[in-house]
Amino acid sequence: MHMQRLSGRTAIITGAGRGIGRAIAIAYAREGARVALVSRTTDELEGVAAEIRSTGGQAQCYMCDVRDSTAVNAVVAAVLATWGTIDALVNSAGIPMVAPTVELSDERWQQALDINLNGTFFFCRAVGAVMLEKQFGTIVNIGSLHSFQGIPMRAAYAASKGAVLQLTRSLATEWAPHGVRVNCISPGWIRTPLQDSLVAQGKLDRTPIIARTPARRVGEVADIAGPAVFLASDESSFIIGEQLVIDGGWGIYGFL
């Protein structure tokens, strides 16, 4: 019998309708967690919830724009009302932003910061209060290669994801003495519905990415889900404020 590493725990996963968030939600449920699925639209969430329930897992759906702190607080209150506790949080909601910097509008700059950074902060603040009270919890923020690598035409995205990494480190040092662990996963090039659509539109060529990746492939969402389970489990109890880069070696590759 497989020992479920998150048995009896309640987790909130934002951006749970698709891609990395969806994969983490399903993995957490498989490991025994009750999962609160959060997204701006509930259509996709209902499909994820149905998949989790079909294998005996527990899931609830919550529609929420992470940019709205009042809505975020309401979701946290609702999850507490339903399950009485929150033991894990994964901040996976995010949007990409690609544009020449001089053409980047105020609105698009702000949108990237509002969703990627503010949304992460609002959920950390609301859930952190719950976890600090009971002196236990794990938070996994989703960063990016852009948290630490310089890549052209990503000013807004890089600024927001770099900030997520530093937010992670600051919260980790503040909350670790009180039993709350905060870490960050920074995925590399991962095949998601969004990436597939960019390839289909001719906006992204995977060939040079794969050529630079020692693993000789792009990542799959499952490559992120497993480590996310580990960071929420007791197996990682001494890992505090770390950035786990999952990119198949892309970032360290030093050859042509």
Image (cartoon, helix red, strand yellow):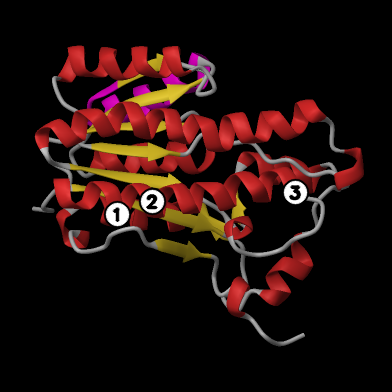
The image shows residue 15, relative to residue 99, as above or below, that is above
Find residue 51 and report its horizontal and vertical position in percent. Answer: 36, 28
Tag 1 and tag 3, C-beta contact below 8 Å: no
Disc 2 versus disc 1: distance between alpha carbons? 6 Å
Residue assigned mark 1: 173
Work out whether residue 63 can be spotted.
Answer: no
- Which element carries disc 2, helix, strand or loop? helix
Q: Is mark 1 on a helix, strand or loop?
A: helix
Tell me the CA gap for discs 1 and 3.
27 Å
Q: Nearer the viewer, residue 170 or 37?
A: 170
Above/below status of 115 relative to 150: above
The x, y position of residue 251, in whole percent, is 61, 72
Binning the other alpha carbons within 10 Å of mark 1 as few (below 14), some (14 to 19) or many (20 upward) gives some
Q: Distance between the residues labelled 2 and 3?
A: 22 Å
Identify which amino acid the numbered label 2 is placed on: Ser
Left or right: 31, with 186 as reference point: left
